[in-house]
Structure formats: C-alpha cells, structure tokens
Image (cartoon, helix red, strand yellow):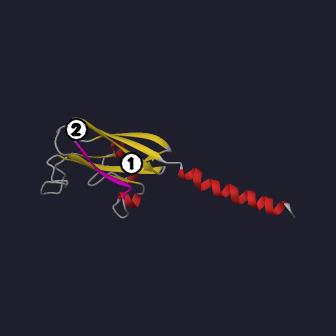
Amino acid sequence: MKTLPLVLSLIVGLAALVPASRAAETSSLTVTFSGIKATTGAILFTVVNSEAAYGDKAPASAQGMLPVSTNSASKVLSGLAPGRYAIKAFHDVNGDGKMNANPFGIPSEPFAFSNNAVGNMGPAKWDDASFDVKAGDNTHAITID
C-alpha cells in the first residue's frame, strides 16, 4: 500500500512536466513575398490557423503590414503554435489601406494566397492555401501579382 502514494506522486509529477514541454513547442514563420512589380505602398496580410478564420468567421492568428521598397519583402512571425495555417495578402500599391477593385468587384491591386493557390470567382479555398507549420523555424514563399 505504501507504493500507491509513490506511484500517484510520480504520475502527478510527470503530468506537470507535459504542459511545460508543450509550451516550449513554438514556431517561427518567415514569409517572403516575391514578384512585386511596384515598389510603393505595402503588403497587407492575414495569417489564420483555421478554416473558420480563413473565411473571416474567427480571429486571425496574425496580421501585418510590410512596407515595399524592392521586388521582394519578408516578415518573420514568431510565437506561433505548430499547426495548419493559410495566408491571404494584397499589395496596397497606392497606400490607401484597402484593396481596390474595379466597378465589377474584381481586384485592381495585386493579391495572393499561401501555396500560390488560385481562387475561382473568389478567394482560394482553404484546402488549397493551407500548409503545415512545425515546431521551430519555418519558411513560406508567396508570389504576389
């Protein structure tokens, strides 16, 4: 009977270690946008970790504005949890803070999705744009045009 408290103590002690090790599992994601034609304005982007967030029905994991001065631009996002992510971005060439469109609603500024996924009469699908982010350092390249 004396071993039971020892075993329970050991189990509780090991369980306390698990969250600490999982908390250490963070990711960084370096996103590089290339194919930039105009070296004005900024790239505005949203990083999401669920299909609901991709459809604007849940909060984004990260958002940012990346000034453009050359034909490529990079941003490092730190502290992400490992998982499945997708990115939506557009190049705000004129710097007005919004994605401009023609009278028919077709974007008139360059845009892109992760995996260089292409939409059909709307944004690319989550399944096409999503990618895995593992613990540690990750990179993802997007051509914006």
Dot 1 amino acid type:
Asp
Please say whether residue 61 is one of the residues in the magenta stretch.
yes
Report the disc number at residue 90.
none
Q: Position of residue 97 (x, y in %)?
A: 19, 54
Image quarter hosting the N terminus: bottom right
Report the disc number at residue 128.
1
Give the distance between the C-alpha atoms of the residues marked 1 and 2, in whole angstroms.
22 Å
Which residue occupies 27% across, 55% down?
Answer: 122
Pick the front one: 30 or 119: 30
Q: Is residue 73 left or right of residue 37?
A: right
Which stretch appears magenta? 60-67
Look at the numbered discs 1 and 2 and tell me whether their residues touch, using CB distance below 8 Å: no
Can the viewer see residue 34? Answer: no
Which residue occupies 44% across, 40% down?
Answer: 138
Q: Position of residue 28 (x, y in %)?
A: 43, 44
Query: How many C-alpha atoms fall within 10 Å of the one at disc 1: few (<14), some, or many (≥20)?
Result: some
Residue position marked by numbered label 2 in the rendering: 36
Which residue occupies 45% across, 40% down?
Answer: 137
Q: Secondary structure at mark 1?
A: helix
Which residue occupies 62% across, 54% down?
Answer: 18
Dot 2 amino acid type:
Ile
Q: Secondary structure at mark 2?
A: loop
Mark whose residue sits in front, 1 or 2 = 2
Image quarter hosting the C terminus: top left
Q: Position of residue 66 (x, y in %)?
A: 26, 45
Please say whether residue 102 is one of the residues in the magenta stretch.
no
Q: Main secondary structure of the magenta part?
A: strand
